[in-house]
Amino acid sequence: MARRLVALLVLATLLGACTTADDPQDGGAASPSPSPSGSPPDSGDRVAVVVGPSPTVPPGERAAQLAAAEALADLPDVSELRVVEATSLGFVEDLALVLADDGFDLVCVVGTGTADRVERVARERPLTRFCSTDPLAHDPPTNLVVVGLDLSAVAAVAGAALGVPGGPVGLLASPTTGELEPLALALAEQLPPLPSPAPSGTPVPTASPSPPAASAAPTTAPTPVPPPPPRPRVLPLAAPTREGQARGLVDDVRGSGAAALVALGGRTDSAVATAADAATPVVGIADWLVDAEGQLPASVLLAVVVDRRAVLLAAATAARSSPGAAPALLGIEQGVLEVLPGTLAASEAAAERALALLQRTVG
């Protein structure tokens, strides 16, 4: 119960900063946050954070990233922290370039869907250190360190939470969240096997066999090995490109007989969860599922809370201490995931199953 209360408090803190989503085509001015109060020390790194735009970055995640960015002021030897919000993906690049040219020692670009932008800027400014929390950076240069969320870990938590569903499980993802295959595998490995069917009918009696002849050697019949019980199927689903298609996607999920939906599509998850209902419970990432008011839709069985602050701190620390480090993913073992029950009748039991997995894995 204490862990669940922490999850509630963390989610409330992250989502309390939700702002109205900006027009992705708007190239308006950035909104810098004030630097930490008081006079900065004479020496130390100047650190900047560029937060990606809505709707590319889901509004709930954007608010969480803004709150997480302020924690970088507490890193040792930081003389200045500047946080700016981009209103378009193109503006992400412009802001990062300006900050690099202004002499900032470290420029972090955060938010789902911004990986290719920060990669491009890092190549253009090889003397500046960069960090990213978008794990889809494919070939980062040595001055860019990437530390992101392991979505396969989220899929595993979702599988544990679902228990034994009464049918296939739909898995919703999108190009901004990576390939479906590893997510589907992580989900399937945690779904408990379906119960074996009960024997039907009454066995037909058979005649007693004749006693073997005296000369025949006794034989032992091999013990039949029952096949392993089947697991629920995972149905990979591509996220729609427009939120208006959410209802059609949910209808397709129901038509396929899916008993639940694991939503890892980012910008579409809130609309899909709103279009679903108790007949198709949804599991996903909390700050991707919340609506514009920061509330979870009624159809959510379980929300996975991501510690965006811990992920960003890890990325910034690695960029300052280990330049050229390979991309890293954080998940269950690193303690960056928590769970929050939804409002459905089975939500408490789902949360208990998910917490059991977290506790076993973290140790």
Image (cartoon, grey):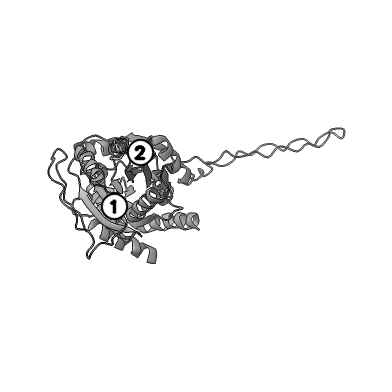
Figure check: 12 above or below 143: below
Which is nearer the N-term, disc 2 or disc 1? 1
* Camera-nearest residue between 159 and 30: 30
Q: Position of residue 238 (x, y in %)?
A: 31, 34
Q: Is residue 261 left or right of residue 245?
A: right
Q: Position of residue 218 (x, y in %)?
A: 81, 37
Figure check: 336 above or below 152: below
Element type where label 2 sits in the image: loop
* Camera-nearest residue between 194 and 182: 182
Q: Is residue 28 visible?
A: yes
Q: Quadrant of residue 88?
A: top left
**Residue extending farthest right:** 215
Number of marks drawn: 2
Q: Is residue 299 visible?
A: no
* Label 2 CA crowd tier, 10 Å (few <14, some 14–19, many 20+): many
Q: Quadrant of residue 184?
A: top left
Q: Quadrant of residue 226?
A: top right
**Residue extending farthest front:** 42
* Camera-nearest residue between 157 and 349: 157
Quarter of the picture containing the N terminus is: bottom left
Reading the image, the residue beneath label 1 is: 47
* Label 1 CA crowd tier, 10 Å (few <14, some 14–19, many 20+): many
Q: Is residue 334 left or right of residue 254?
A: right
Amino acid under disc 1 = Val
Report the residue at 28% width, 60% height from top. 42
Labels 2, 1: front one: 1
Element type where label 1 sits in the image: strand
Amino acid under disc 2 = Leu
Q: Is residue 258 left or right of residue 30?
A: right
Q: Position of residue 68 (x, y in %)?
A: 29, 55
Residues at marks 2 and 1, CA–CA distance in whole angstroms: 23 Å
**Residue 136: mark:** 2
